Image (spheres, helix red, strand yellow):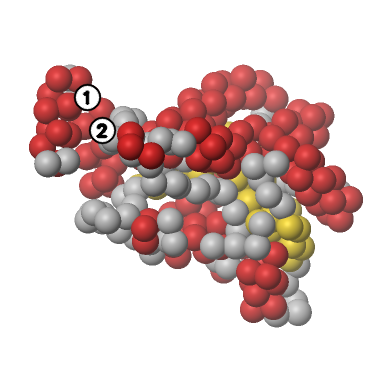
Amino acid sequence: MFENKTVLITGASSGIGRAIAESPALKDSRLILTARRIELLEEIKNNAGTNSRIEIIKCDVSNKEDVKSAFEKAESITGKIDIAILSAGIGIAVNPENLDSSAAEEVIKTNFLSAVYWIELLLPGFIKRKEGMIVGVSSLADNRAYGTSFYNPSKAALSIFLEGLRLDLKRHNIKVITVKPGFVKTSMTDQNNFKMPFLLTPQRAAEIILNGIAKEKKIIQFPLPTVLLTRMIGLLPLTVYEFLAGKTKK
């Protein structure tokens, strides 16, 4: 599946993106790694050794012009991109007492619009060749609010966008995969001050994601207990959900 493929990974400097970039499953692929922190991408490239085929590009995915520049550089180096794994994401803690629209802009640009920026540039080539794969990393947190947050709505937007895109691109033979992880131990989840059930390592998450991509699953969601729990929560009537959610906040 991945042999001799050119794989773009955004948000590759840490978390799930980095674990995917360092996965043995991609050892025979040509990797294009992007992130704001270029020094962390250099670490990945150096650790991979001289036999690896890794290109690193500094890119702020929340900046449309930066994404365009990174895409053009990637295409000039590799000729084409076969698989785009769009894993860049952030979370900023907010509450009604410190609501800040600038935080909303940053989260929505990084978690949702960045994927749109990349896909806008990728699609002409994919459609012309009648091939290509887009993998968007969303979240199981896309189903309900769970309190004041910009993270959940940004992931909900991404999930719904990818679902519609999947339908429209089927006739072009372009695959669109939505990834919905539960809790994964990263620098972002390290900021959470609540218990995170069924917490996975980034390496285990990367393994599940790459296995799902190889099988061309439309949705890759995990771990199963969290999937089932979020489905149940999503089916609750609003009044019941608000009552139970209110109990957890007291």
* Viewer-closest of 55 and 210: 55
In this view, 186 is above or below 151: below
List x then y, in percent, for residue 55: 76, 63
Residue 159 image offset from top left, x and y in percent: 47, 31
Q: Residue at x 24, y 54 (%)?
A: 194
Measured from the top left, where is residue 41 in percent x and y? Answer: 67, 67
Residue 236, by quadrant, is top left
Check disc 2: other Cα within 10 Å, few if <14, some if 14-19, many if 20+: some
The answer to whether residue 174 shows anywhere in this view is yes
Q: Is residue 198 above or below residue 217?
A: below
Residue placed at 63% from the left, 69% from the top?
Answer: 40
**Mark 1 — residue?**
235
Instruction: Tell whether label 1 touches label 2 (CB within 8 Å).
Output: yes
Kindly identify which numbered label has been placed on residue 67.
Answer: none
Give the residue number, with chain letter if any, for mark 2: 231
Q: Amino acid at mark 1?
A: Leu
Q: Residue at horizontal 86%, vertical 55%?
A: 77
**Residue 4 visible here:** no
Quarter of the picture holding the C terminus: top left
Q: Say few, some or many: other residues with alpha carbon within 10 Å of mark 1 (under 14 / 14 to 19 / 20 or more).
A: few
Q: Nearer the viewer, residue 104 or 37?
A: 104
Q: Quadrant of residue 123?
A: top right
